[in-house]
């Protein structure tokens, strides 16, 4: 009984003591933000047909649809070309900010609003990757995904270095300005009856995040003891770790359901299912390459059976790191091939980003080292070394191999409750809008 109690106490301390998997959450933040940003930029010339108020799916039809399914979309708050252009540009800027890790907490919320607004406006546009992006944009709001590989982490490292040298760090002004502007927008759309018009879940989440940011700032400014700051940090870590488990479970559920559904199909059973998409005009950007791949019935059968086996087996391999890593490489390679052969780049990018949550920490650190050296080579010829301080090494860094081993790495902690801001000091909860 004492051994069980000791194990339980260690697990509780692990979950509440730090936000786990900092590199994994940073990778999925970068992956999904890049996927949505590239999609918005590629479709910029066609944005009117996809989501515009005067497109084929008109504003009146969009209003009728959202009134019926109670889906959240900011594009239905106002009718007009100007409002649509503002929302589209804000979605692009929020994606770029999340990609770079600038004011990650606010950027993740705006990113979610942009994704939900566009996708719920025209639900008949997109593919399976949009569904993954739709869900992950919500989950990212609950994570502390800017602990590493972000401008927030760089700003926190610089502030900590300045404090160590005894220098005075200027107070953060950007965070309060973002918080005030977002609060004014929330008050406006709430009082006009637009925010809660089609439901309460997403609007309640927006108000909760806004109030949490205010609470963090108030505690950092006026709390006389460390207990309130510690409590906020514990709550933020628990929420982050819970969201990380949900993201991993969601990825496993996607592959498990896809694999078991394929098993029931006769074309997958006889090994010919892959052949038919390769000969559809919509999925054949490179007809010659598709013909080359489909010229061998043996290859088609191996690909079909291999796809089913990998998808069904993957959730069960999370308890074996080596087998899991092998299947992870196979699945990512498969998605890369789908992006090229079937012309579905954004679907493949979304799935690869979801798979990245299972990548080993050691491999991600290796990639980060390569990226840092490549950046150093680019900036040094400009006259001097402009490299930035490296993030602190996470404590007890381990692989994030699945829900049973979420003890990846504590990572570089920002200020309590979220990513540290410019005015944060060690042990303080900075204003993190």
Image: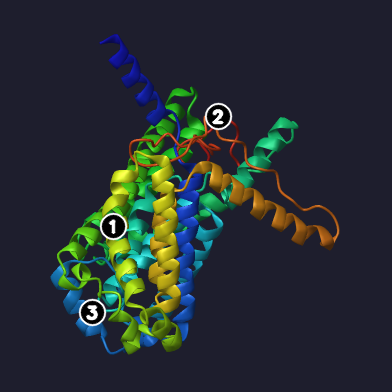
Quarter of the figure with the N terminus? top left
Q: Residue at x 41, y 36 (%)?
A: 237
Question: Marks 2 and 3: CB-CB under 8 Å?
Answer: no
The disc at residue 397 is: none
| Sequence-wise first label, 2 or 1 | 1
Front-most of 410 and 359? 359
The disc at residue 62 is: 3
| Sequence-wise first label, 1 or 3 | 3
Does residue 208 appear left or right of residue 88 in this picture? left
Front-most of 172 and 148? 148
Residue pointed to by mark 2: 427
**Distance (Cα) linking label 2 and label 3:** 48 Å
In the image, residue 182 lies at what x, y percent?
42, 58
The disc at residue 309 is: 1
Are there few (<14), some (14-19), or many (20+) residues within 10 Å of tag 3?
A: many
In the image, residue 199 lies at what x, y percent?
19, 61
Residue 351: quadrant of the picture: bottom left
Foreground disc of the pair 1, 3:
1
**Distance (Cα) linking label 1 and label 3:** 40 Å
């Amino acid at each position: 009984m004492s051994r069980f109690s000791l194990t339980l106490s260690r697990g509780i301390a692990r979950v509440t003591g730090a936000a786990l998997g900092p590199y994994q959450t940073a990778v999925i933040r970068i992956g999904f933000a890049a996927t949505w940003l590239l999609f918005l930029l590629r479709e910029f010339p066609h944005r009117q047909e996809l989501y515009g108020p005067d497109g084929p799916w008109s504003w009146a039809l969009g209003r009728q649809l959202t009134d019926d399914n109670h889906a959240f979309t900011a594009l239905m708050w106002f009718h007009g070309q100007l409002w649509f252009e503002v929302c589209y540009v804000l979605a692009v800027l929020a994606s770029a900010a999340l990609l770079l890790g600038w004011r990650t907490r606010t950027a993740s919320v705006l990113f979610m609003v942009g994704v939900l607004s566009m996708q719920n406006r025209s639900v008949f546009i997109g593919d399976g990757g949009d569904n993954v992006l739709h869900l992950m944009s919500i989950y990212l709001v609950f994570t502390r995904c800017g602990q590493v590989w972000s401008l927030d982490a760089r700003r926190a490292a610089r502030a900590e270095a300045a404090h160590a040298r005894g220098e005075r760090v200027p107070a953060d002004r950007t965070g309060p300005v973002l918080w005030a502007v977002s609060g004014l927008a929330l008050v406006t759309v709430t009082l006009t009856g637009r925010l809660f018009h089609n439901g309460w879940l997403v609007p309640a989440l927006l108000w909760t995040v806004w109030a949490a940011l205010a609470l963090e700032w108030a505690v950092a400014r006026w709390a006389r003891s460390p207990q309130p700051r510690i409590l906020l940090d514990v709550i933020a870590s628990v929420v982050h770790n819970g969201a990380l488990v949900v993201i991993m479970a969601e990825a496993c559920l996607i592959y498990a359901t896809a694999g078991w559904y394929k098993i029931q199909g006769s074309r997958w059973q006889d090994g010919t299912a892959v052949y038919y998409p390769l000969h559809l005009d919509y999925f054949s950007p490179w007809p010659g390459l598709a013909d080359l791949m489909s010229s061998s019935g043996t290859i088609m059968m191996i690909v079909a059976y291999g796809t089913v086996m990998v998808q069904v087996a993957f959730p069960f391999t999370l308890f074996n790191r080596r087998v899991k890593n092998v299947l992870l490489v196979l699945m990512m390679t498969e998605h890369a091939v789908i992006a090229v052969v079937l012309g579905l780049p954004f679907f493949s990018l979304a799935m690869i980003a979801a798979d990245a949550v299972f990548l080993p920490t050691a491999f991600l650190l290796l990639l980060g080292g390569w990226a840092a050296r490549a950046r150093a080579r680019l900036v040094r010829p400009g006259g001097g070394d402009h490299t930035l301080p490296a993030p602190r090494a996470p404590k007890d860094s381990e692989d994030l191999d699945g829900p049973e081993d979420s003890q990846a790495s504590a990572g570089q902690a920002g200020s309590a409750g979220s990513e540290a801001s410019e005015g944060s000091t060690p042990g303080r909860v900075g204003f993190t809008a």
